Amino acid sequence: MYAFIKGKIVEAGIDSLILENNGIGYIINVPSGMTQRDVQVGDEVKIYTHYSVREDGVALYGFLSRDDLEIFKMLITVSGIGPKGALGILSGLTADELRFAIMADDAKTISKAPGIGAKTARKIILELKDKLDLAEVLEGGREIEHGAAPADESPQSEAVQALVALGVSSTEALKAVRKAVETAGTGDVEAIIKEAFRILY
């Protein structure tokens, strides 16, 4: 119903804000801490929104980036995860951190989010892992060029596997390779691994 709303923040709480647009104040639920860390009263902002209709009422959920909104929409497709639960997860983890944890089967990191136990974290991994693409995760969600190698055959994937074989945790290997790709490029596995080691150590 609403793709985004642009306006001025007139009130801000810990996990919600009121955004004024053309004389209308929209109450928007946001990740906890966003109003203390990223925005403040008086700021002119563009909030990407999800309009939720449930038996217990309607609500708007909002994010500063389209990427965060897309991850939120993925989370609410997981059985047992509602909008409030998804918002709680994105209050404890960034979209990138969540992607890395899912791709690395890192239930421990996901379970650190408020209200998320180990069982739910494993369910999130199980239901969302196939919806994520390793190459996109490594490149920060950017579209992959047509004709690029499949994720499991890419130099980035090979570099991640090599680092894990050398004892680096899956999550740290993914993060290091992503940073290495930004500086070393995507073509040479050895160059990516060397740069990833420099970043790690």
Image (spheres, helix red, strand yellow):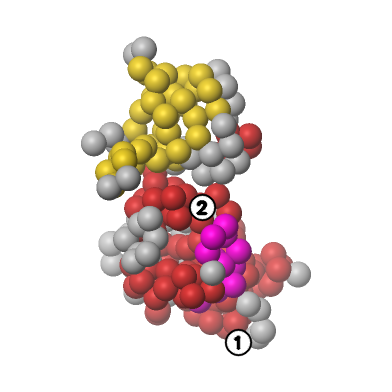
Where is residue 38 drawn, in percent x and y? 59, 35
Residue 155 in view of the camera: no
Residue closest to the eye, 76 or 96: 76
**Nearer the observer, 10 or 103:** 10
Q: Which residues are magenta?
A: 105-116
According to the picture, the residue beneath numbered tag 1 turns out to be 165
Q: Main secondary structure of the magenta part?
A: loop
In this view, 190 is above or below 62: below
Q: Circle 2 sits in a helix, a strand or a loop, which is it?
A: helix
Which residue is the site of mark 2?
88
> Can you tell which quarter of the image residue 133 is in?
bottom left
- Secondary structure of residue under mark 1: helix
In the image, residue 43 lies at what x, y percent? 54, 21
Tell me which residue sits at (23%, 36%) in the image. Answer: 1
Front residue of this view, candidates 137 and 116: 116
Specify which label sits upstream in the sequence, 2 or 1.
2
